[in-house]
Image: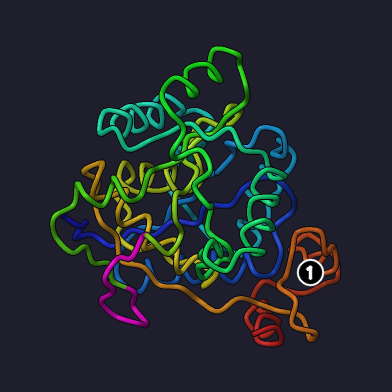
């Protein structure tokens, strides 16, 4: 699949809380990379989760990034305004017959995993992000699926990774600036959820669609999303979307090894500003958490 030849990076926060120091680090990496390569930096608002996203947090994102000295192209793309584009992508995947409804609750999955652990021959598979979905609903008969759907039982749509990979008759690769060329291994994450009743698109689906539409060339993000790149490369291929080059940076952590989080008010950009720290002192502060 083709790749953009013009350098273009993006910072795509969710307005579900105030940005923290880790966000400042990631945003500046994207901004500086674009400037160093004569490219463009854009801001995207990932606000699909309408239950958690708030207008006041969106405004604080703009305020915090301006305080950091960042400049971005306008208008800013907000995911909540583009549900039709994600629906179109889902329709394409449905047309490939690689999606199935999953009616499992978290409790159902937890019970299945606990039961499997009691039988060594049924021990659930584990991936880099934990236990992989055991496929409870993958083998439901069409009659059972139809009945459950007719009853209005809440469900998600998962990708049948085994069926999806049968459509790809060649190795797929993606590139990380630190680790180099990688062969995509989507089985690492299993049958990923691509949509839910209240959310028309998962993170995985929405970002590959957005990155293609916005012609992003480089995705610079935290190393916690490294393995997501395997699956997202497959989605890019199946949907005929542009490939991107990735760079996964280190995460900022506290002295006891915990990742920075929005709930920790002491390291939000807002609190940092209020403490008297200047924008050009942010890099020194970041080094304390790397």
Q: Give the range drawn in magenta.
A: 176-186
Question: Within 10 angstroms of label 1, few (less than 14), some, or many (20 or more) residues?
Answer: some
The residue positioned 79% from the left and 86% from the top of the image is 255
Q: In which quarter of the image is the C terminus?
A: bottom right
Q: Dot 1 lies on which element?
A: helix
Q: Is residue 196 above or below residue 259?
A: above
The residue positioned 28% from the left and 31% from the top of the image is 92
Q: Name the residue under label 1.
A: 267
Q: In this view, does 207 lie above or below 245?
A: above
Relative placement, left or right, of 280 versus 193 is: right
Residue 6, percent from left and from top:
23, 59
Relative placement, left or right, of 180 versus 257 is: left
Picture quadrant of residue 107 = top right
Tell me, yes or no, whether the highlighted magenta stretch contains residue 179.
yes
Relative placement, left or right, of 218 versus 20 is: left
Relative placement, left or right, of 77 versus 163 is: right
The residue positioned 26% from the left and 28% from the top of the image is 95
Residue 210, percent from left and from top:
39, 43
For the residue pair 59 and 108, the one nearer the viewer reads as 108
For the residue pair 121 and 268, the one nearer the viewer reads as 121
Q: In which quarter of the image is the N terminus?
A: bottom left
Residue 38, percent from left and from top:
29, 67
Q: Is residue 81 above or below residue 190?
A: above
Tell me, yes or no, whether the highlighted magenta stretch contains residue 108.
no
For the residue pair 58 and 194, the one nearer the viewer reads as 194
The residue positioned 49% from the left and 50% from the top of the image is 43
Give the colour scheme of this rendering.
Answer: rainbow
Residue 2, percent from left and from top:
15, 54
């Amino acid at each position: 699949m083709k790749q953009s030849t013009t350098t273009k990076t993006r910072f795509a926060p969710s307005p579900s809380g105030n940005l923290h120091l880790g966000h400042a680090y990631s945003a500046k990496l994207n901004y500086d990379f674009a400037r160093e390569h004569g490219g463009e930096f854009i801001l995207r608002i990932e606000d699909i989760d309408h239950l958690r996203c708030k207008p006041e947090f969106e405004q604080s994102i703009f305020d915090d990034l301006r305080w950091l000295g960042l400049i971005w192209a306008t208008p800013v793309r907000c995911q909540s305004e583009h549900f039709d584009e994600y629906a179109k992508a889902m329709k394409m995947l449905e047309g490939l017959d690689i999606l199935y409804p999953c009616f499992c609750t978290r409790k159902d999955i937890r019970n299945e995993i606990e039961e499997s652990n009691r039988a060594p021959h049924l021990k659930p598979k584990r991936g880099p992000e934990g236990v992989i979905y055991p496929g409870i609903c993958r083998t439901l008969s069409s009659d059972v699926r139809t009945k459950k759907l007719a009853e209005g039982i809440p469900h998600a749509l998962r990708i049948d990774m085994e069926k999806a990979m049968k459509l790809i008759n060649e190795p797929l690769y993606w590139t990380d600036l630190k680790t180099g060329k990688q062969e995509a291994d989507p089985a690492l994450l299993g049958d990923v959820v691509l949509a839910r009743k209240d959310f028309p698109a998962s993170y995985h689906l929405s970002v590959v669609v957005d990155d293609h539409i916005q012609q992003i060339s480089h995705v610079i993000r935290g190393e916690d999303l490294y393995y997501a790149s395997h699956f997202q490369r497959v989605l890019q291929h199946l949907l005929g979307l542009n490939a991107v080059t990735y760079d996964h940076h280190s995460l900022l952590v506290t002295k006891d090894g915990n990742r920075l989080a929005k709930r920790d008010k002491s390291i939000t950009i807002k609190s940092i500003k209020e403490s008297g720290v200047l924008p050009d002192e942010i890099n020194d502060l970041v080094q304390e958490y790397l």
